[in-house]
Image (spheres, grey):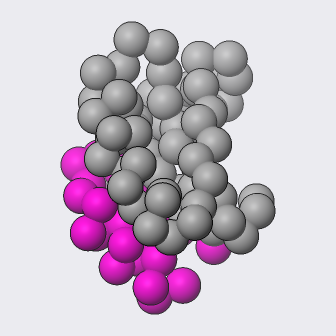
Amino acid sequence: MNQSELRLYTAQNCHLCEVAEDLLQPLLEQQHLILRKVDIGVDADLKAAYGLRIPVVVLPNGVEKGWPFTAIQVKRLLVSV
C-alpha cells in the first residue's frame, strides 16, 4: 500500500460508503492523500471479510477503521502513524 493512500472498502449501492467518501474528501485534500476505493463485490474473500463492516477505511500503515467513523477520528489515527 502506498504511504500517501487511504483505501476504502465499498460495495455498489452502499449509501454509507458514499457518505464515508464524502466525509473523507476534505481530509484527503488537507493531508495530500489519495483515496483508492475497493469494491468488495468482485472478490469473495473481501466480501467475506468486509461484507458486514463496510465502509472500512484502511490507513497507509494497515490500521483499519470500520463504520461509523468521523474525519476527525481518521485524522487522529493518521497522526499516530
Where is the C terminus found, in terms of image quarters?
Answer: bottom right
Q: Nearer the viewer, residue 29 or 7?
A: 29
In the image, taking residue 12 as reference, residue 68 lies left or right, namely left
Residues rendered magenta in the picture: 61-81
Say if the magenta span includes residue 76. yes
Residue at x 50%, y 70% (from the top left corner): 31
**Which quarter shows the N terminus?**
bottom right
Residue 68 percent location from the top left of the image: 23, 49
Residue 63 in the magenta stretch? The answer is yes
Residue 10 in sight: yes
Relative to 30, is 26 above or below?
A: above
Which residue is drawn at the image coordinates 59% and 61% (left, top)? 33
For this view, does 59 lie left or right of residue 60? left
Pinpoint residue 38: horizontal percent, then vertical percent: 62, 33
User: For the point 36% across and 19% down, which residue is it?
Assistant: 14
Q: Residue at x 39, y 11 (%)?
A: 13
In the figure, 61 relative to 40: above or below?
below
Q: Is there any visible trace of residue 64 in the rendered image?
A: no
Q: Is residue 50 left or right of residue 68?
A: right
